[in-house]
Image (cartoon, rainbow, N blue to C red):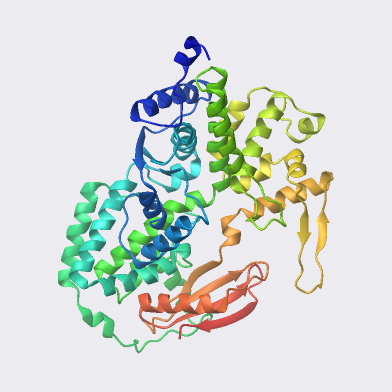
Amino acid sequence: MDASTSSNLLFQGSDWNFERISRAYDAIEEIALEELKLDVYPNQLEIISSEQMLDAYSSVGMPLMYQHWSFGKRFVFEEHHYRKGYRGLAYELVINSNPCITYLMEENTMAIQALVTAHASFGHNHFFKNNYLFRRWTDAGAILSYMDFAKKYIARCEERHGTAAVESILDSAHALMDQGVFRYRRPPRLSSEQERERIREKLEYEEQSYNDLWRTLPPSAREGEPDGKDENASERKKALKLPEENLLYFLEKNSLVLEPWQREILRIVRVIAQYFYAQRQTKVMNEGCATFVHYYIMNRLFDLGKIDEGTMLEILQSHSNVVFQPDFDDPRYPGLNPYALGFAMMQDIQRISTEPTSEDEHWFPDFAGTGDWREVMLDAWENHRDESFILQYLSPAVIRRFRLFRLTDDATEPYCEIASIHNERGYQEVRAALARSYDVGVNLPDIQVSDVNMLGDRHLRLQHNVKNGVLLEERSRDETLRHIRRLWGYDVSLVGREAGSERLLYECSAQ
């Protein structure tokens, strides 16, 4: 390598320092903003150790988090597997916040620091800022200050009420996190610092004026009749805005036995659950976007002579590991790798836009051959979640590449049947079936508060709308009902009805 070529390189060798990271960041930023037209939050890069990364793993990836025994348990589990060599650690961790915080591992080589900067600080960052789910359901500018408030608030509760009392509420709240999100209506925005100060003052006043006699109230003499016989049921449900899908929200607002500090803890847990709800719906798109961005940027840096062959080989090896898709009979098979599927679909959009086949022109007439793949991707990243993205952009070429087909599995039959293969109709059915599998609403049980008579027996009635005959696992169901009973303070029952027909499938109650 001559001197002129060497002087053009951003770095040489595996050792990193902050000057090299800064120089690489500037070159990556130029390509990301000028060529890919990405729109990102300001970036904040921090270097952390492997132990700090393990700590971040255990606290669901947040830099500020309250204490709970489950986080310590997960830390011990992750550390054991890491020390034994059973699994590695992520090269980076990125926080959906403004500014966008990216944690880089100090054990990374300089090549990997550049790779993950492109991946997280620009790929994920752009997706966080622009995707409609994140814009609608999360508040990137307030989440860090809110988590700081939550950590300090729960620490004060532990000092005032004891660790056991706080952990008991957190245990019950964590058990309901999956049922503690708004799926169909927008949640309230996170409050400002001034508003949180007002809330703190209000909570202190409520705690001083709280009367524990509420916990001893017996059932009212005017007990409501069971569902269907109470003449005031419709008015009562309207007043309570029933049915309610967010169980934590309902308990926070309506439980008669919770003290003000306990209500605030429920609110903290459901805010965190809501924060991660958008990420659960965009795993394929988010990772696909970030992987495509780092792949494009690293190749452009190589083409421009800013990284050498050795660096590029290390980057490609890491990239290949990320997008590796094990076969179904491989012991490592975890299902479809979201990195692999997302990246393959992004590359396929680029191919269809620039070099379409006649099949592509038939399936994607709106953008096949237009050449403007950047606009297609930017629009997809902004306006879709995994389900709709797969339903609209999964091509027959990718279906063939991943060798996808559809099985029907009827519990009444002793065998499975191949229902969809690689033909025109089969491609459509495979695409639709795969899209449905990424619908969070399908994968999580639909459990709602259906009725409660606050002036009567205060019996909380829940309804599970059963889809496709999939019932709840009994042990987990009964344990969760006991957590609801603890937070509600009165009888709790659950009925399972077949979605669409209202046919009763099961009944149970908290024991």
Residue, x 82% and y 58% (percent of image)?
A: 418
Residue 417 image offset from top left, x and y in percent? 82, 62
Give the percent coordinates (x, y) of residue 472: 58, 73
x, y percent for residue 56: 38, 52
* Image quadrant where one finds the C terminus: bottom left
> Residue placed farthest to the bottom in the image?
221
Q: Is 359 located above or below residue 250 in the figure?
A: above
205 relative to 429 in the view: left or right = left
Kindly identify the residue that appears in the image at 22 percent across and 66 percent down. 157
Residue 367 shows in the view: no
- Tell me where residue 29 appears, x and y as whole percent: 44, 25
Viewer-side residue, 339 vs 333: 333
Residue occupying the point 70% across, 29% down = 351
Locate residue 67: give its quadrant. Answer: bottom left
Quarter-of-image position of residue 366: top right
Give the quarter of the image for residue 394: top right
Residue at the right extreme, as displayed: 423
Res 47 seen here? yes
In front of the other: 33 or 332 = 332
Q: Nearer the viewer, residue 485 or 206?
A: 485
Q: Is residue 390 left or right of residue 492?
A: right
216 relative to 34, above or below: below
Q: Could you say which is closer to the camera, residue 3 or residue 202?
A: 3
